[in-house]
Amino acid sequence: MASLLTDTLFEARGQAPAPSKDFYQLLVTKKEVIFRWWKISLRSEFREARPGELRETHEDFLDDPSLQIQIAIVFGGDTLDHIFNMCRGNYDFLVRLPDPLLLYIMSYLDLEDIARLSQVSHRFETLCNSDKLWEMIVQNLSGRITSEMRSLAHEVGWKQFFFTNKIQLQLQLRRRRQMKTESSDSLSD
């Protein structure tokens, strides 16, 4: 499974915490951790500072607390934990899947599983609440979506549309039809 990984496993860019304006880049490849920095300062002692780069193997990175602290300061503890896992060979393949594929897979989950999955991370919360997912779920369950249903779903949102019971849905569709006929009647007068 690890052979399916691209050479670059992780990449992040960021700015150091205020008041610093320094810019950092972090790359994790299959074999090494690469930390790059650019000093941005108006101070005369830093004007001649050139960009820097530090390359370490995964094993060396795991034994280098000074680089670990620097990464935690710039990118946060969660990023540092993620890099530790990659350097130890623990890859999260689910994170690497593109959103359309994840949405397709998620559209076949039970509602309870979708609710649990939304609590895993910000990315999954966003995906679990996305209109695209709920549109796919409605499509899977109903098989056929009329243009009238699609129009109502775009108005109220696909998730709300899914959780609206059939009687309420029929009532809303009937009201929309009445409003359209009344507006077309008033235009013809």
Image (spheres, grey):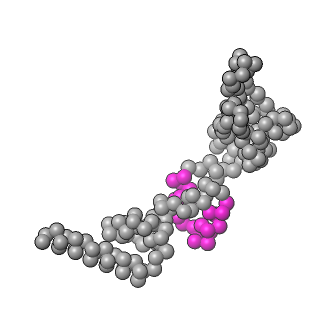
Q: How many marks?
A: 0
Residue at 72% from the left image edge and 39% from the top image edge: 17
Q: Which residues are magenta?
A: 99-120
- When asked about the image quadrant of residue 139, the answer is bottom left
Check residue 110 for magenta coloring. yes
- When asked about the image quadrant of residue 52, the answer is top right
Q: Residue furthest left?
A: 189
**Relative image position of residue 67 (x, y in whole percent):** 81, 35
Residue at 68% from the left image edge and 32% from the top image edge: 21
**Relative image position of residue 167 (x, y in whole percent):** 41, 83
Check residue 72 for magenta coloring. no
In this view of the protein, which residue sits in the foreground, 183 or 115? Answer: 183
State whether residue 42 is above or below residue 8: above
Q: Residue furthest top?
A: 48
**Relative image position of residue 35 (x, y in whole percent):** 73, 31
State whether residue 151 is above or below residue 46: below
Q: Residue furthest bottom?
A: 167
Residue at 32% from the left image edge and 66% from the top image edge: 147
In this view of the protein, which residue sits in the foreground, 48 or 159? Answer: 48
From where the camera sits, is residue 51 visible?
Answer: no
Please name the predominant secondary structure of the magenta segment in the image: helix
Which quadrant would the C terminus be assigned to in this image? bottom left
Residue at 32% from the left image edge and 69% from the top image edge: 148
From where the camera sits, is residue 100 visible?
Answer: yes
